[in-house]
Amino acid sequence: SNVIVNGSTREYSYWFKLTNQDDDPVAVAPELILPVNGEQNIDLTNPVCFRWKRGQNLTKYELQLSYSNDFTYIFDNFETSDTNMYVSTLVSGQQFYWRVAGFHSGSDTPLYSSVWSFTTKAEVIDPPLILNPKNNAVNVYQREVYRWTNINSAIHYRIQISENETNKIVVDE
């Protein structure tokens, strides 16, 4: 285009970009990668790795873990700006559901990934060793003190007493 500057005609080219500052950039929800949907018996010896693809125009994420697929009860959640998280607080022998909420700058409205599930490996607990009374002991007092070895991961103990191996149980506490 030609313009007149101080009485002289000059030719100029203009480059410009039109933007609408009121529009937010389009944000896209994150996509889950690990653990794989439906994975069974995840070993809890080491922390479990959760990984997802970065969502478009998202600046922070919240990993959500739940016992139910509708997330009415959140087992735990973790905030991060990264796309992976290592979790060491999972419970053995449970089914979990997980998703990632993504947030873009200036918004508190989350964009949720799909919901995936997995189960953790059940922990096998060795039985305690009976210390008192000894096996096959005779003339044991009714109010005998019963002792066994401690199992660190046990939540509670159950004691069963019978007159012999084939009789029905007399005490079950």
Image: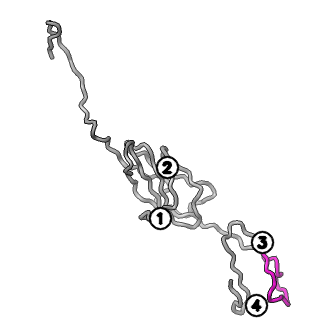
Marks 4 and 1, how far apart in space? 46 Å
Circle 2 residue: 79
What kind of residue is marked 2? Answer: Glu
Q: Residues within 10 Å of mark 3 (few under 14, many from 20)?
A: few
Q: Earlier in the sequence, mark 3 or mark 4?
A: 3
Marks 1 and 3, how far apart in space? 36 Å
- Left or right: 120 in relation to 105: right
Give me the residue at 85% from left, 89% from top. Answer: 138
Q: How many marks?
A: 4
**Label 2 close to label 1 by CB (< 8 Å):** no
What kind of residue is marked 3? Answer: Thr
Circle 4 residue: 164
Give me the residue at 14% from left, 14% from top. Answer: 2
Q: Residues within 10 Å of mark 1 (few under 14, many from 20)?
A: few
Q: Quick one: SS at disc 3?
A: loop
The circle on residue 73 is: 1
Dividing the picture into quadrants, the one containing residue 5 is top left
Q: Position of residue 73 (x, y in %)?
A: 47, 64
Give me the residue at 48% from left, 53% from top. Answer: 63
- Left or right: 150 in relation to 46: right
Q: Position of residue 79 (x, y in %)?
A: 49, 49
